[in-house]
């Protein structure tokens, strides 16, 4: 309905018509909102991951973490961490805090009614003293949201609450991935320790035999010093590996939030924990899967709503103060006939001069939205880069692992032949020691490559958003 038609109706419809027109006008004003229409920014990334499978499809479903991990001990440890991790508790407390703030913003739309009893005594120069007592219900400075300021603030508070919930999910995602990665690292530490202890024992045996041969004149001092060097190197490596395992176990304890039960630790000599395959999907899937991207978008929505509140500040702020109750000069006269009454005091305040405060607040709100758009786009770009890196790792770790296994086989055969040639007097002991050193290095590289491949698989699962609700 046009404003002219509304005025015509007001003039011709009489008192009831004018009342209806006024109510209609108030309803229209109450529905006003200066919040800009929200539009999701376009994803600033390519439409496909580099090196992704040609048959990748949108909407690929990732398994929950309980299906992603095959080892029962590791599943139990992740569940324990989700119960006890202090970072996750902080994140959940933040959610409850922001939830309460949203309820406060929502409550601001409704009037606050209080019951009260007051008494007042006044004296004059003549010595006369008068009293007045009041009791009843009071509505204090209720802001009527004609221009949507409070509604915009409520919308912003809701978006902040949803953002905090996504932040909690992101924290859970990070904790689950960290527990899995750290447990796998401890498992690799055990494998490296076993490998180092075996190498140390072999080198100590070689040192004893070399010393015996040296004492009998069958080995040179150079052979003895080489054997001593390799044995000392093995002891140093063993100490380093023991320290690394202790530190990784401390990190796992911190993630779990309590001492890790011994029966949930990786077993010495056990096979590596198996992880489920991860379908990569398409970049558009990240917008629905990744909680950090959804968090950034909710923060953008909140910034957009705050612009509406800043714009509404340029218009009058209308409030209503009212009371209903009984008043009497005597306390016993309250609530008697003739003592009842009410007050109604509407107020409209329009800022005329504030030295540019409202303008600055609007500029600040718009700048926050600009930054929120950049943060949202950066979160998408970061997610895309993490997935692309993990896919590159998946494409290459298999070949690297196969090559490392071939290297270990070749070095083991070299070690056997060097020892055989030495025993037959064809080669020097230095050849044997060099073969031992090369085999140990190749075996270490194999264990580290296996770990890196598994960590990359966990990283891909996390980067794609994961199915952590398992």
Image (tube, rainbow, N blue to C red):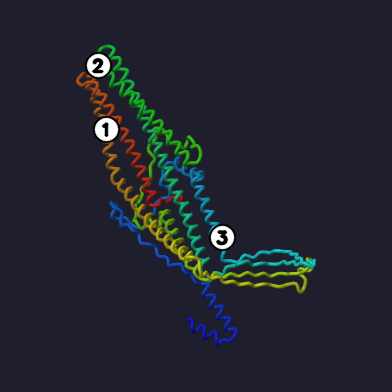
2 or 1: tag closer to the N-terminus: 2
Query: SS class of the residue under badge 2?
Result: loop
Q: Position of residue 70 (x, y in %)?
A: 41, 43
Q: Nearer the viewer, mark 3 or mark 2?
A: 3
Question: In the image as oriented, which residue stretches furthest toward the top?
Answer: 216
User: On the image, which quarter does residue 112 sit in?
Assistant: bottom right
Q: Nearer the viewer, mark 2 or mark 1?
A: 2
Q: Which residue is mark 1?
A: 409
1 or 3: tag closer to the N-terminus: 3
3 or 2: tag closer to the N-terminus: 3
Q: How far apart are the alpha carbons under marks 3 and 2?
A: 86 Å
Residue at the image point whose x is 26% and y is 38% from the top: 403
Q: How far apart are the alpha carbons under marks 1 and 3?
A: 68 Å
User: On the image, which quarter does residue 36 sit in?
Assistant: bottom left
Task: Assess disc 3: are there few (<14), some (14-19) or many (≥20) residues with their C-alpha within 10 Å of its C-alpha.
Answer: few
Q: Which residue is mark 3?
A: 104
The circle drawn on residue 220 is 2
Regarding residue 459, the answer to whether it shows in the image is yes
Asked if residue 121 lies left or right of residue 165, the reply is: right
Q: Is residue 288 above or below residue 253?
A: below
Query: SS class of the residue under badge 3?
Result: helix
Asked if residue 317 lies left or right of residue 211, the reply is: right
Asked if residue 84 lies left or right of residue 405, the reply is: right
Q: Position of residue 189 (x, y in %)?
A: 39, 34
Q: How far apart are the alpha carbons under marks 2 and 1?
A: 30 Å
Cβ–Cβ under 8 Å for marks 1 and 3: no
Q: Position of residue 171 (x, y in %)?
A: 45, 49
Task: Assess disc 1: are there few (<14), some (14-19) or many (≥20) residues with their C-alpha within 10 Å of its C-alpha.
Answer: some
Question: In the image as oriented, which residue stretches furthest toward the front?
Answer: 125
Q: Is residue 131 above or below residue 269?
A: below
Q: Position of residue 442 (x, y in %)?
A: 29, 33
């Amino acid at each position: 309905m046009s404003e002219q038609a509304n005025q015509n109706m007001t003039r011709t419809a009489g008192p009831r018509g004018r009342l209806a027109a006024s109510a209609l006008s108030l309803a229209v004003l109450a529905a006003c909102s200066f919040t800009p229409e929200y539009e999701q920014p376009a994803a600033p990334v390519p439409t496909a991951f580099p090196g992704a499978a040609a048959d990748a499809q949108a909407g690929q479903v990732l398994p929950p973490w309980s299906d992603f991990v095959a080892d029962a001990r590791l599943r139990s440890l992740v569940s324990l961490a989700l119960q006890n991790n202090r970072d996750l508790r902080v994140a959940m407390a933040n959610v409850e805090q922001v939830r309460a703030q949203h309820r406060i913003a929502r409550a601001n739309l409704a009037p606050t009614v209080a019951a009260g009893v007051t008494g007042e005594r006044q004296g004059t120069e003549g010595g006369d003293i008068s009293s007045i007592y009041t009791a009843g219900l009071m509505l204090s400075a209720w802001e009527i949201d004609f221009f949507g300021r409070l509604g915009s603030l409520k919308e912003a508070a809701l978006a902040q609450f949803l953002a905090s919930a996504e932040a909690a999910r992101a924290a859970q995602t990070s904790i689950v991935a960290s527990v899995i990665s750290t447990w796998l690292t401890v498992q690799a530490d055990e494998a490296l320790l076993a490998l180092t202890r075996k190498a140390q024992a072999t080198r100590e045996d070689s040192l004893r035999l070399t010393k015996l041969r040296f004492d009998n004149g069958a080995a040179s001092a150079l052979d003895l010093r080489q054997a001593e060097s390799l044995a000392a190197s093995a002891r140093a490596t063993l100490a380093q590996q023991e320290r690394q395992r202790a530190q990784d176990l401390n990190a796992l304890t911190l993630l779990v939030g309590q001492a890790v039960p011994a029966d949930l630790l990786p077993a010495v000599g056990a096979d590596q924990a198996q992880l489920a395959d991860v379908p990569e999907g398409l970049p558009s899937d990240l917008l629905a899967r990744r909680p950090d991207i959804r968090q950034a978008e909710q923060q953008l929505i909140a910034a957009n709503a705050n612009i509406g509140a800043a714009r509404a500040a340029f218009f009058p702020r209308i409030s209503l103060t009212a009371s209903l109750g009984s008043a009497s000069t005597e306390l016993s006269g309250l609530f008697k006939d003739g003592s009842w009454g009410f007050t109604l005091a509407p107020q409209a305040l329009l800022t005329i001069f504030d030295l540019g405060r409202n303008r600055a607040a609007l500029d600040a709100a718009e700048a926050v939205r600009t930054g929120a758009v950049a943060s949202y786009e950066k979160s998408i770009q970061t997610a895309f880069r993490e997935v692309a890196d993990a896919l590159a790792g998946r494409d290459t770790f298999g070949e690297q692992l196969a090559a490392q296994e071939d290297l270990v086989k070749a070095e083991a055969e070299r070690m056997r032949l060097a020892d055989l040639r030495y025993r037959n007097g064809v080669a020097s002991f230095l050849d044997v020691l060099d073969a031992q050193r090369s085999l140990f290095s190749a075996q270490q590289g194999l264990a580290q490559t296996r770990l890196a491949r598994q960590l990359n698989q966990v990283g891909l699962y996390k980067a794609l958003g994961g199915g952590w609700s398992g």
